[in-house]
Image (tube, grey):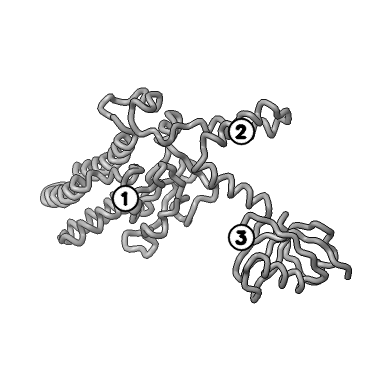
C-alpha cells in the first residue's frame, strides 16, 4: 500500500499533526510519538463521526483524512458532538461574545431553520447573569417587593416559601385528628418546624451564593432538571437559569420540588401512625424532616417531568433518593 497523508488529533490537544503512513500500525506509532501518547492500548477513529478504524478500513481512507488517536478507555462521538460541547463550555465563559456572533450571523442567514435556531440562541443568551444587585438589573426585579435587593435574596425566599407551604400542609392535617393524637401530632410537627426555622427554611437550595454542597444550581445560577421521581436523570435535558432574566425567573416558578415519597399519600399518614405508636424520639423527627424538607426526598423537576401519578414508594423503602445521586448540575 502506498503512503498516505493523514491529519491526526488527540483529546489532549486541539492541534492537528500531519502524519505519513502506509499502515494502521505505522500511523499509531508515528501519531503517538507526535502527540506524546503511550502507544499501548491506543485506537483510531474518524474525527468526523467516530467510526472505529481497523486495518481493513484503513486501506479505504483517502489522503488528508482527519483522524483522532484515542488512549485506552477513551471514546469519540464525532465532530459535531465535539464542537457543540465546546460551544456549550464557551457559552458559560463568553456569553456576551457568543450572543454578538449569533446576532451577526442572523442578519446574513436566509435559511428558515437556521434563522430560527440562531434567533432562539440570541434571544435566550441575552441575559444579565452576572448581575446580582437590583440596581444592576432592574428589569429582573419588576413586580417584586422592594425589600429584595439581590437576586439571591429573592431566590432564597422563593425556595423557603415552598418549604413553608409544605409545612402548612403538614400542620393543617391536625384538624383531621382528635384528642391526644392531635395534641401529640402538633407537638411532633412543632419540633420539625423549629429545625426548619434553624435552617432558614432551606432557602440555600436556590441560592447560587450558597455552599456548592447545599445549592441545586451552579455558581452562575443554572438549574438542571433531575428527572421524574422514578428516573435517575432528566431524559429531556431541561435546564434553566432564573438569574439570567425576568422571563426565566417567572418560568422557574413552574418547576417543582417534587417529593419522591409522596407527602400527602405516604409521609403524613406514616407520621400519624408513628405518633399513635408513640415513636416520637429525636431520630424520628430527623427522619420525617428529611423526607419532607430536604434533598434526601426532594427532586427539582421541570413541569413536564413532574409525574402526578401515584409513586408507590413507602417511607421505609430502599428507593429513597440520596443527595449524592441526584446532585447533577
Position of 216 with respect to 178 (left or right) is: right
Q: Give how far across and how far down residue 133 sits, in percent.
A: 33, 31
Residue 199 image position (x, y, % from top left): 22, 48
Q: Earlier in the sequence, mark 2 or mark 1?
A: 2
Q: Which quarter of the rendering shows the N terminus?
A: bottom right
Judging by the rendered image, the residue that carries numbered circle 2 is 102
Mark 2 residue crowding within 10 angstroms, few (<14) / some (14–19) / many (20+): some
| Element marked by disc 1 | loop
Residue holding disc 1 = 211
Residue with the most extreme right position: 2
What is the spatial separation of the Cα atoms under label 2 and label 3, in whole angstroms? 27 Å
Residue 45: % across, % down:
71, 63
Which element carries disc 2, helix, strand or loop? helix
Q: Residue at x 76, y 72 (%)?
A: 26
Q: Position of residue 293 (x, y in %)?
A: 28, 49
- Residue at 71% across / 59% down in the picture? 17
Amino acid at each position: 500500500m502506498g503512503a498516505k497523508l493523514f491529519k491526526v488529533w488527540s483529546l489532549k490537544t486541539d492541534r492537528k499533526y500531519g502524519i505519513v503512513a502506509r499502515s494502521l500500525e505505522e500511523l499509531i506509532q508515528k501519531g503517538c510519538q507526535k502527540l506524546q501518547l503511550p502507544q499501548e492500548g491506543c485506537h483510531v477513529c474518524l474525527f468526523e463521526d467516530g467510526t472505529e478504524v481497523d486495518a481493513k478500513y484503513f486501506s479505504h481512507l483517502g489522503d488528508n483524512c482527519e483522524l483522532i488517536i484515542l488512549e485506552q478507555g477513551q471514546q469519540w462521538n464525532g465532530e459535531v458532538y465535539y464542537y457543540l460541547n465546546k460551544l456549550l463550555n464557551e457559552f458559560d465563559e463568553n456569553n456576551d461574545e457568543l450572543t454578538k456572533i449569533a446576532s451577526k450571523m442572523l442578519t446574513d442567514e436566509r435559511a428558515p431553520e437556521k434563522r430560527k435556531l440562531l434567533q432562539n440562541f440570541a434571544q435566550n443568551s441575552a441575559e444579565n447573569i452576572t448581575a446580582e444587585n437590583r440596581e444592576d438589573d432592574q428589569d429582573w426585579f419588576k413586580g417584586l417587593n422592594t425589600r429584595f435587593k439581590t437576586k439571591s435574596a429573592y431566590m432564597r425566599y422563593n425556595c423557603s416559601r415552598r418549604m413553608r407551604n409544605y409545612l402548612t400542609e403538614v400542620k393543617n392535617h391536625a384538624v383531621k385528628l382528635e384528642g391526644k393524637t392531635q395534641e401529640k401530632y402538633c407537638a411532633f410537627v412543632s419540633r420539625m418546624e423549629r429545625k426548619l426555622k434553624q435552617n432558614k427554611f432551606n432557602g440555600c437550595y436556590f441560592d447560587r451564593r450558597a455552599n456548592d454542597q447545599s445549592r441545586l444550581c451552579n455558581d452562575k445560577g443554572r438549574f438542571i432538571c433531575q428527572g421524574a421521581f422514578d428516573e435517575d436523570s432528566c431524559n429531556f435535558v431541561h435546564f434553566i437559569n432564573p438569574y439570567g432574566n425576568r422571563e426565566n425567573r417567572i418560568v422557574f416558578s413552574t418547576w417543582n420540588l417534587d417529593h419522591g415519597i409522596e407527602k400527602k399519600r405516604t409521609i403524613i399518614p406514616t407520621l400519624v401512625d408513628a405518633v399513635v405508636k408513640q415513636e416520637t424520639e429525636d431520630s424520628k423527627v430527623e427522619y420525617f424532616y428529611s423526607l419532607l424538607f430536604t434533598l434526601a426526598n426532594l427532586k427539582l423537576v421541570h413541569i413536564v417531568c413532574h409525574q402526578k401519578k401515584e409513586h408507590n414508594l413507602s417511607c421505609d423503602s430502599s428507593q429513597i433518593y440520596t443527595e449524592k445521586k441526584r446532585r447533577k448540575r
